[in-house]
Image (cartoon, helix red, strand yellow):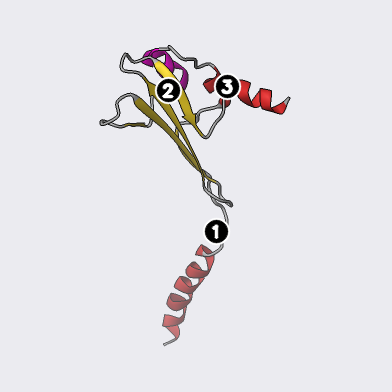
């Protein structure tokens, strides 16, 4: 009976130590699109120029080939989930029409700050 005691205590201590892990990791996914990059875009650019500035889009809808979606999410270790979506719209010839979404261009944010 005495020889079973160490075998019972080892798993108990193991379970207690696994609860001591307090380190958490920030989880970042998707395309990071900054206001500076959006400020470089202007109507009339072709798709290759936009891809050079912003990178490849995360989503390309097969039913809407003229719309690219850049999605970014950040889940901080301690905090709420943050999700940003940028929609880049092109005409039928592949020229940039405009940008919609959560991040504003640097020029617009500088003008709003003035």
Name the spot of residue 13 as percent of width and height, x first.
51, 71
- Which residue is tagged 1? 21
Quadrant (top left/top right/bottom left/bottom right) for the N terminus: bottom left
Which segment is the magenta one? 46-55
**Helix, strand or loop for disc 1:** loop
Question: Which numbered tag is attached to residue 36?
Answer: 3
Q: Residue 35 is drawn in which quadrant? A: top right
Q: Do the residues labelled 1 and 2 touch (CB within 8 Å)?
A: no
Name the spot of residue 16 as percent of width and height, x first.
52, 69
**Helix, strand or loop for disc 2:** loop
- Residue depth check, mark 2 versus mark 3: number of the one nearer the observer: 3
Name the spot of residue 70 as percent of width and height, x first.
43, 31
Q: Residue 62 is drawn in which quadrant? A: top left
10 relative to 102, above or below: below
Q: Looking at this rendering, what residue extends furthest in the left direction?
A: 62
- Which residue is tagged 2? 55
- In the shown orientation, is residue 80 left or right of residue 114? left
Mark 1 vs mark 2, CA separation in Å: 37 Å
Q: Looking at this rendering, what residue extends furthest in the right direction?
A: 114
Nearest to the observer: residue 85 or residue 13: 85
**Helix, strand or loop for disc 3:** helix
50 relative to 26, above or below: above
First in residue order: circle 2 vs circle 3: 3
Quadrant (top left/top right/bottom left/bottom right) for the C terminus: top right
- Residue depth check, mark 1 versus mark 2: number of the one nearer the observer: 2
- Residue 107 shown in magenta: no
11 relative to 36, above or below: below
64 relative to 44, above or below: below
- Residue depth check, mark 3 versus mark 1: number of the one nearer the observer: 3
First in residue order: circle 1 vs circle 2: 1
Q: What secondary structure do most residues of the magenta stretch adopt?
A: helix
């Amino acid at each position: 009976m005495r020889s079973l005691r160490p075998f019972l205590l080892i798993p108990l201590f193991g379970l207690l130590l696994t609860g001591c892990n307090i380190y958490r990791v920030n989880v970042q996914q998707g395309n990071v699109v900054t206001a500076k990059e959006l400020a470089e875009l202007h109507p009339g650019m072709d798709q290759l120029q936009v891809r050079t500035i912003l990178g490849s889009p995360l989503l390309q809808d097969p039913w809407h080939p003229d719309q690219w979606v850049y999605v970014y999410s950040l889940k901080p270790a301690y905090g709420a989930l943050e999700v940003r979506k940028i929609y880049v719209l092109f005409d039928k010839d592949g020229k940039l029409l405009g940008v919609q979404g959560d991040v504003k261009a640097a020029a617009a944010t500088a003008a709003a700050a003035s």
